[in-house]
Image (cartoon, rainbow, N blue to C red):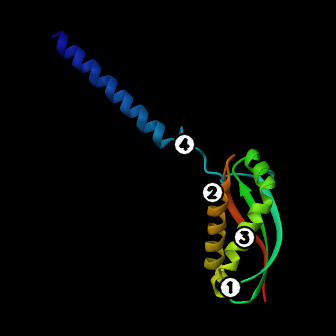
Amino acid sequence: MKKNKVLIIITVILLVGAAGLLAYDKLGFGKKAEVGTDQSIDDVLKVSVDIGEIATNLLDNRYVKISFTIETDSKDAKGELEKRKFQVQNIIITELSEMKAPQLEGKEGKQQFEDAVKTRINEIMQEGEVVKVYITSYIIS
């Protein structure tokens, strides 16, 4: 009789624990909020760095003038990115020097370039990471 009571108690405890874990997961507790969701523009600006305009030649001897704002995941990352601005500019110029004008055309081309720059910058970041790279102006001639 005692074995049955102990077995029932253990089963109830396991069921309550499983229900608790399921509720915890379904209600989203413990999940890190995605950066960029439900952020005010003021919050985004507090962790963003304006890289300014860069003018350089492309691989096909065309010329590009392009500006960026880069969003980070924290104020510490923003501070580091501001210090690494010259390295970021170098990354952008290096990436652009290997591209031809058609590769930057259209939404998809710009998105791929933004992603490539983000990846390269995150390789050098130590205090956080880049969340999003925004092209803020763009001219090819």
Q: CA distance from mark 3 to mark 2?
A: 14 Å
Which amino acid type corresponds to the residue marked 4 in the rendered image? Lys
Residue ID for mark 2: 123
**Label 4 vs label 3, nearer the camera:** 3
Per the model, the C-alpha gap separating discs 4 and 3 is 33 Å
Residue hosting label 4: 31
Q: Residues within 10 Å of mark 3 (few under 14, many from 20)?
A: many
Whether residue 41 appears in this view of the structure is no
User: Identity of the amino acid at label 2?
Assistant: Glu
**CA gap, disc 1 and disc 4:** 44 Å
Image point (28%, 21%), residue name: 10
Quadrant containing the C terminus is bottom right
Q: What residue is shown at x 81% (from left), y 54% (from top)?
A: 82
Asked if residue 10 is positioned above or below residue 116 in the image, the reply reads: above
Question: Residue 11, relative to residue 119: is it above or below?
Answer: above
**Residue bearing mark 3:** 92
Provide the secondary structure element on which disc 2 rests. helix
Residue 83 at x, y percent in the picture: 80, 53
Horizontal and vertical percent for residue 108? 61, 78
Q: What residue lies at 67% left-to-right and 81% top-to-bottom?
A: 104
Query: Which mark, residue 59?
Result: 1
Let me know if residue 53 appears in the view: yes
Q: At which x and y percent is residue 114?
A: 66, 69
Position of 83 with respect to 24 (left or right) is right
User: Which of 54/105 is in front?
Assistant: 54
Marks 2 and 1 close (CB-CB < 8 Å): no
Farthest-out residue, right: 52
Residue 37 versus residue 48: which sits nearer the camera?
48
